Structure formats: structure tokens, C-alpha cells
Amino acid sequence: MTMEIVGRGFLARNLRPIADRHPRTVVLAAGVSCAHGTSAHDFAREADLLRETADRCRATGSRLVFFSTAATGMYGGVAGLGREDGAVVPCTPYGAHKFGLERRLRESGAEHLILRLGHLVGARAPAHQLVPALLRQLARGVVRVERGAARDLIDVTDTVTVVDRLLERGVHGETVNVVSGHAVPVSDIVDHLEERLGLSARREYYGEGRQYGVSVEKLTRLVPETALLGFSPTYYRQVLDACLDPLRCPAALPAAS
């Protein structure tokens, strides 16, 4: 018996190599993944899927892993570092949706593990995610940057490593931030991509992004091996470099259109 992965997208594909290691586990890697999503229909569909999956896990005694968010939608309104046991006031419809689903899962009676993820980066990531979107804009010569916006990037392979360790240790009934702990200004991310690709794009600034920080205290306690992953203020560079590696991601830079 192997781990059941609900979903066929970016994260689900990356989790498949560890499926044989975790029987009696169901991973819900489906649902709303776009932080800008506001569709009531999509939110309701994910809520229904979570309820149905939690009911099934409760009946079979399986552990359910649910992926929430540690992005600005969850922690952008928090003073100081966002902590799993701290007060949270979601500041986007997406953040409020995920926060609400966390509560429903805790109340469901199913054995569970809630993981609040940072911004995943890796090969074949969805087009709407930050790095693919920036790469397309760089190819076209104009990049739109939200003033003051920052993002905590984490390599999807490092995310899978963390998930693997948490499941291996039988962690359940917990909410854990799975992030690097270093939110980087989007302008710095664009700088590094330009340098690596030898490009220079005009920047169009808009809006006013939120500054935020996320605590990794609980993560490092539960998974001390994160010390080997290179989490630091410059970690984002190795994440971007890996994404641009032609051996790992041969189509990293899309053609302009």
C-alpha cells in the first residue's frame, strides 16, 4: 500500500517518488493553487473535496496531509513573524479560504497534518506562479513589479524532503510552516534573473505590496535536517539557479509572444 496523492499537478508530480514510503497517508495536492484566485466556485469545490477526503480518512484511519499557504494572504497582516500558533488575520480571499479550510480539517476528526507552504519553485511549475510569470515578462522586455512586495521562495524538491521527513516521523495534529524563513523583495528576484539570463527589462511598478516574515522555529525543531538545505537570506539564488539549470528545466525561459 502506498501513499495516495489526490491531484495531478506540480506538487503532486513531485511527491510521487516518496509515495512508497508512506502507507496509510492521503495527500491532498489538488484545489485552488493561485494566490490571486477569488472564484467562489473554485473555493467551494476545494472545500467539498477536503470534506469528502477528510471523511474518508476518518473512516479508514488514514492521515490526511493538507497544503495551506504561508504567503502574504495568510501572514501579510501579522506584526512580526507569522507563527503557526499565533493570531492570524488573512488579508486576501485566498488566505481566508485556506485558513477556513484549516479550521474545518481540525474539526473533522480526521488524523491530519497541515503544511503552510511558501512560494514553490521548480521545473514545470504552473504558468501563473511567480517565477514562470517573471521569466515570460523578461523575455518580452517589460516586467511588472509590485512596490515593496516580497516572496519566500522554496525549491519544490526541498519541500518534498521536508514532507518526507515529517511523515517518516509520524507527525500529525500539527500545523507547520514549510518555508525558507527569508522573504525576498521581488525586485531582488528580478535582479538575479536578469543577471543569470543576461537580460535587462524595463520595470513597471504598481500598487503597494505587503512586507511579511514567517517563523521556521517549529519547522527546524521537527526537521533539523533543514540546516542542510541552505536556508539563508541568499537561499533564493540557489533556488532560481536550479530552476534555470537546462539539465533540470530545459524550457526555463519561454519564448516571447
Image (tube, rainbow, N blue to C red):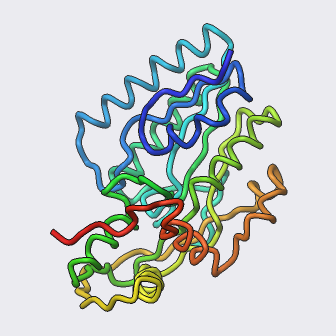
Q: Residue furthest top?
A: 59
Q: Residue at x 67, y 35 (%)?
A: 18
Residue drawn where x is 45% and y is 45% of the image: 10
Q: Quadrant of residue 166?
A: top right
Asked if residue 160 is positioned above or below residue 54 in the image, the reply reads below
Seen in the image, is 137 located left or right of residue 1? left
Between 111 and 236, the one nearer to me in the picture: 236
Residue 209 located left or right of residue 83: left
Position of residue 45 in the picture relative to residue 109 (left or right) = left
Where residue 199 appears, as percent x and y from the top left, is 34, 88
Spot occupied by residue 29 in the image (x, y as percentages of width and height): 49, 36
Taking the image as shown, residue 122 lies to the left or right of residue 229, namely left
Q: Residue at x 45, y 89 (%)?
A: 195
- Could you say where residue 176 lies in the image, as x and y percent from the top left? 67, 48
182 in relation to 101, above or below: below
Provide residue 209's location: percent of width, then percent of height: 37, 76
Number of marks in the image? 0
User: Residue 131 versus residue 204: which sits nearer the camera?
Assistant: 131
Quadrant in which the C terminus appears: bottom left
Image: 120 above or below 21:
below
If the image is split into quadrants, where does the N terminus sit?
A: top right
Residue drawn at point x = 27 percent, y = 70 percent:
136
* Depth check, front residue: 246 or 195: 246
* Quarter assignment of residue 60: top right
Q: Using the image, determine if residue 235 lies above or below residue 61.
A: below
